[in-house]
Amino acid sequence: MIFPTKPEPRDVDPARSAIVVVDMQNAFASKGGMFDLSSLDISGARRVIDVIRETLDVARSAGIRVVYLVMGYDEAMTTCGGPDSPNWHKELALKLVRKRPELKGKVLTQGQWDWQVVDDLKPQPGDLVVNKTRYSGFYGTPLDSMLRTRGIRTLFFAGIATNVCVESTLRDAFFLDYWPILLHDATMQAGPPLLQEATIKNVENYLGWTLTTSDFMQTVNQHLVRGARV
């Protein structure tokens, strides 16, 4: 399949491709979740959820693998790092817990509502789910080996937040010689819109390719129609 990616088209084998859905959890996309409690704007989350759901349906119909990344810590928060770790100082959930200790064991804690994938995007049988404790889905996880053993070479990215966990994982994918494609309208930034635009430009110029979900779905559907005629 040839996708109309920017800055130039990419010829992609669906059997060697996956969509990486980054952190589509209540923490980042639902009212009462960690982002909302931290006064970050989540008004765009509903649109992102809807477009990802539609995109995943089309991807699965073409045999494109779906991979979920889920950010979260153990209940005692031993996996987040202590004061000697920069993650302890910068990661939003950890800062929120220090400000509001009653939230410990609730925000971004494995098994809790905040940690769960939003209801409309629950993983389906056959999808891969990878838990992570840092922004990048490759750090300290089996993601790389899971992809390589399945022959995956191209990664489409969707999720939240564009400028944090999505970009961090996409960068590592590029460094590991995957072919990263950002489905930019299936993402939402943490912070002002300029951060969304900055990530899109970084990807197009230095780290990979970008594509809209409408172009993704149109290309896949045309491929399926041609295949049905053969």
Image (cartoon, rainbow, N blue to C red):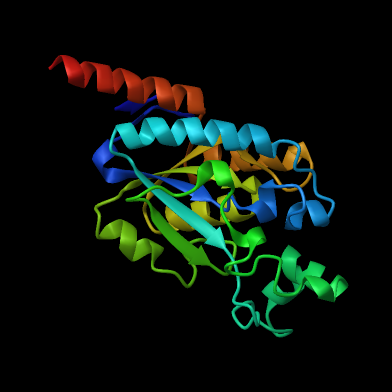
Q: Residue furthest left?
A: 230
> Image height check: is 180 above or below 230?
below
Q: Is residue 185 visible?
A: no
Q: Is residue 196 left or right of residue 122?
A: right
Q: Position of residue 54 (x, y in %)?
A: 48, 30
Q: Is residue 125 left or right of residue 46?
A: left
At a point 52% along the width and 56% down the height, the residue shown is: 169
At a point 36% along the width and 22% down the height, the residue shown is: 219
At a point 61% along the width and 61% down the height, the residue shown is: 115
At a point 56% along the width and 52% down the height, the residue shown is: 117
Q: Is residue 11 left or right of residue 205?
A: left
Locate residue 15: give its quadrant: top left
Q: Is residue 70 visible?
A: yes
Q: Position of residue 107 (x, y in %)?
A: 71, 66
Q: Residue furthest top?
A: 229
Q: Is residue 88 left or right of residue 220?
A: right
Q: Position of residue 207 (x, y in %)?
A: 50, 46
The quadrant of the picture occupied by the C terminus is top left
The quadrant of the picture occupied by the N terminus is top left
> Image height check: is 132 above or below 12?
below
> Image height check: is 57 above or below 179?
above
Count of numbered labels shown in the rendering = 0
Q: Position of residue 19 (x, y in %)?
A: 42, 43
Q: Nearer the viewer, residue 128 or 157?
A: 128
